Image (cartoon, rainbow, N blue to C red):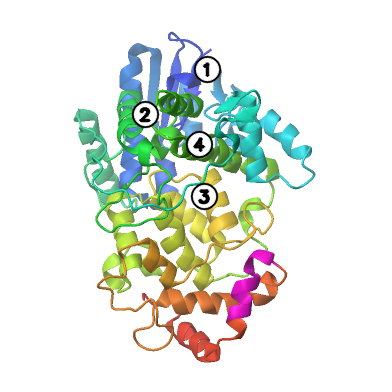
């Protein structure tokens, strides 16, 4: 039967053989409903069109206003792998001529996760799931025990990895030119985008993705996980893999990618600490967020228990980096504006952290991260933003909020050098908005955080700050203005 492929199902592992016919549908309405980053729209459309070109006569490629229009034009029965959003799942289930198959592109199945989570009696924690996945798939395991004797191999923070070769830049072609012309026309017609157009930075074909993966295994995997909270203004990559877009477009299959990293360890080409950390990110954290999205299902993305009800200000939503004086936040917004991407430390420590401190609405942040980042997906952003960065769901993902002061940002980055604000100052015109904002956040949420053992020390320190009322008044006065 002809297999309908969504834009995040473009790899060969979403098909059952090299001769299976394929349906690809471009929905213009997807981009009409919300303002996506221009480079994300380019990446998605380019990936679909490159896949259609690769498949040739095997593919029916339709450009329509909606998916419903595309299915109506095709008119025949098709099958589709389980989509990655609830909205898409509900849509395909409602179509008479669409058969929904089990999900692909992840390591653990829905059924296996549900069986495991049901047995945890409400305590479905990441660490336990990661061990379960390692054992179930035999990753860095010998005789049922972890290689090296520990499930997590922690190393002392070392120097920030610098001077690594940049990842191979994709070479744009006629398909990219066509996509860019279409997006220019759509913008002229009134479809809104955010961010800047630029030469494509991420793979859109499996060949490009495999090239990026090989580069990571050789040049970055040996350093992966070392000082992974580090942030440098001039180096957006550091030792991070940059493979998230390839996983999320379905160009790379996660389990084989982890096995390649394990092979590098066993060949003596990468340390156990780096390979274990990569495995944890891919078969642990990535799968865990995906499964929580479906397992908890109703209510999880709403953030209804979160105290924050403030909308995202315009300067943040539109990536207006020039209006921001705080160097870390300005640099982060500029990176998103220019690349549609930053690594996870910047997302959490700067962007998500600022939203935590200011009490911005969690669902607004989920929407923003999904639209502004080229690798943004609803299932991933709900766990990362609502569950972790916004700390809106206390029991689902993390036991403490990801909120830190300017002094932490100073230790982890070079952003504070030359900034008009002093990370050690919490009051006055030179006070860092992250330092004052952190204390104000603790003050605002102290009752909700009371009893959280991981926040006990911070709350005790808060009680000893004599100028706290002035700090709170200062940060409230700053309000939603660009810092």
Reply above or below: 121 against 349: above
- The mark that comes first in sequence, 4 or 1, is 1
Gap between marks 1 and 3 measured at Cα: 34 Å
Q: Nearer the viewer, residue 238 or 26?
A: 238
Reply above or below: 2 against 436: above
- Residue 242 visible, this angle: no
Gap between marks 2 and 4 measured at Cα: 13 Å
Q: Nearer the viewer, mark 2 or mark 4?
A: 2
Q: Which residue carries the number 4 mark?
A: 276
Counting from the top left corner in percent of width and height, residue 349 is at 44, 61
Residue placed at 57% from the left, 56% from the top?
Answer: 388
Q: Which residue carries the number 2 mark?
A: 269
Residue placed at 55% from the left, 61% from the top?
Answer: 390
- The mark that comes first in sequence, 4 or 3, is 4
Counting from the top left corner in percent of width and height, residue 88 is at 56, 37
- Which element type, helix, strand or loop, lies under badge 2? loop
Around disc 4, counting alpha carbons within 10 Å, would you say few (fewer than 14), some (14 to 19), or many (20 or more)? many
Q: Quadrant of residue 469?
A: bottom right
Q: Bounds of the magenta span?
A: 452-461
- Residue 393 visible, this angle: yes
């Amino acid at each position: 039967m002809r297999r309908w492929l969504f834009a995040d199902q473009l790899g060969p592992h979403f098909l059952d053989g090299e001769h299976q016919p394929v349906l690809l549908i471009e929905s213009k309405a997807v981009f009409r409903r919300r303002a996506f980053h221009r480079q994300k729209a380019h990446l998605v459309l380019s990936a679909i069109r490159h896949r259609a070109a690769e498949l040739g006569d095997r593919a029916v490629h339709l450009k329509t206003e909606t998916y419903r229009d595309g299915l109506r034009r095709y008119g025949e029965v098709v099958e589709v792998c389980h989509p990655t959003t609830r909205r898409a799942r509900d849509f395909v289930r409602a179509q008479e001529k669409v058969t929904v198959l089990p999900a692909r592109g992840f390591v653990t199945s829905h059924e296996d996760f549900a069986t495991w989570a049901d047995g945890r009696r409400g305590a479905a924690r990441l660490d336990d799931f990661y061990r379960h996945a390692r054992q179930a798939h035999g990753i860095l395991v010998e005789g049922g025990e972890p290689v090296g004797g520990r499930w997590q191999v922690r190393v002392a923070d070392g120097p920030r990895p610098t001077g690594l070769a940049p990842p191979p830049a994709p070479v744009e072609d006629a398909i990219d030119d066509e996509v860019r012309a279409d997006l220019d026309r759509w913008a002229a017609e009134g479809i809104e985008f955010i961010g800047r157009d630029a030469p494509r930075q991420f793979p859109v074909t499996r060949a490009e993705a495999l090239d990026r993966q090989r580069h990571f295994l050789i040049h970055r995997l040996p350093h992966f996980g070392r000082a992974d909270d580090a942030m440098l203004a001039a180096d957006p990559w550091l030792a991070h893999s940059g493979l998230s877009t390839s996983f999320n477009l379905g160009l790379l299959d996660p389990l084989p990618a982890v096995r390649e990293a394990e092979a590098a360890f066993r060949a003596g080409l990468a340390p156990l600490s780096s390979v274990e950390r990569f495995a944890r990110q891919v078969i642990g954290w990535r799968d865990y967020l995906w499964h929580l999205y479906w397992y908890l299902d109703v209510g999880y993305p709403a953030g209804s228990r979160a105290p924050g009800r403030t909308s995202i200000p315009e300067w943040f939503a539109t990536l207006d980096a020039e209006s921001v004086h705080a160097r870390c936040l300005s640099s982060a917004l500029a990176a998103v504006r220019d690349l549609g991407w930053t690594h996870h430390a910047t997302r959490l420590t700067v962007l998500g952290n600022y939203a935590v401190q200011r009490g911005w609405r969690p669902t607004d942040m989920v929407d923003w991260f999904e639209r502004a980042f080229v690798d943004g997906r609803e299932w991933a952003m709900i766990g990362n933003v609502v569950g972790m960065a916004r700390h809106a769901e206390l029991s689902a993902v993390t036991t403490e909020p990801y909120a830190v002061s300017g002094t932490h940002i100073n230790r982890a980055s070079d952003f504070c050098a030359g900034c008009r604000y002093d990370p050690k100052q919490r009051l006055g015109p030179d006070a860092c908005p992250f330092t004052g904002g952190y204390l104000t956040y603790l003050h605002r949420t102290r009752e909700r955080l009371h009893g959280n053992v991981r926040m006990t020390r911070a709350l005790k320190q808060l009680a000893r700050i004599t100028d706290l009322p002035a700090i709170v008044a200062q940060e409230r006065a700053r309000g939603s203005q660009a810092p």
